[in-house]
Amino acid sequence: MSKYKATGKEREIHHCVICDEMFLEYPCSARPLLPGDCCPRCDDLIVTTIRMITAVDQAQGALAAEMMRRAIDMRNGKRELMERMREQRGEHKSDAADAGVSS
Ligand SMILES: [Zn+2]
């Protein structure tokens, strides 16, 4: 049985702000890394690790969190660029189709 109290939230699809995946498990807080929710895997691997480092040395924890945030920003930036490229290709394709119709 689940160790969590049933709230109905476990039936929702959640988005992890760290790995960018959708998940069905109960969401965990991504703080202090990021605002929002993360999946239990990122909570175990990343958020808990950052909290442990912070408990030993606050400055090192802040540095580890900053490093992770930069990696996530890079990943998100890359995804946005890919989406923009796909949009441009789509526009380009429709331009070509329009040119085909007019000629
Ligand atoms: Zn995740």
Image (cartoon, rainbow, N blue to C red):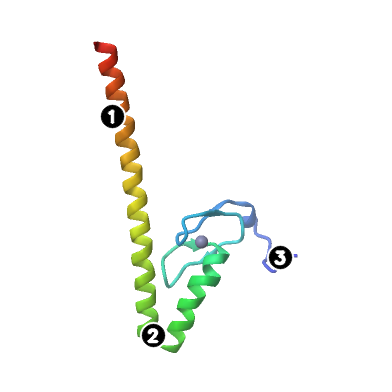
Question: On residue 27, which mark appears?
Answer: none
**Residue found 46% across the figure and 56% down from its top:** 20
Location of the N terminus by quadrant is bottom right
- Say which element carries label 2: helix
Residue 52: x percent and y percent?
Answer: 49, 82
* Residue at the outermost bottom position: 56
Q: Which residue is mark 1?
A: 92
Residue 38: x percent and y percent?
Answer: 51, 63
Residue 74: x percent and y percent?
Answer: 33, 59
Question: What is the three-letter code of the residue carrying label 1?
Answer: His
Q: Residues within 10 Å of mark 3 (few under 14, many from 20)?
A: few
**Residue found 34% across the figure and 48% down from its top:** 80
Residue 23: x percent and y percent?
Answer: 57, 55
- Please report whichever mark, 2 or 1, sits nearer to the chain's N-terminal start: 2
Q: Residues within 10 Å of mark 1 (few under 14, many from 20)?
A: few
Q: Which residue is mark 2?
A: 58
Q: Which residue is mark 3?
A: 2
- Please report whichever mark, 1 or 3, sits nearer to the chain's N-terminal start: 3
Q: CA distance from mark 2 to mark 3?
A: 33 Å
Q: CA distance from mark 2 to mark 1?
A: 50 Å
* Residue at the outermost top position: 103
Question: What is the three-letter code of the residue carrying label 2?
Answer: Gln
- Say which element carries label 3: loop
- Find residue 103 and report its image quarter: top left
- Please report whichever mark, 2 or 3, sits nearer to the chain's N-terminal start: 3
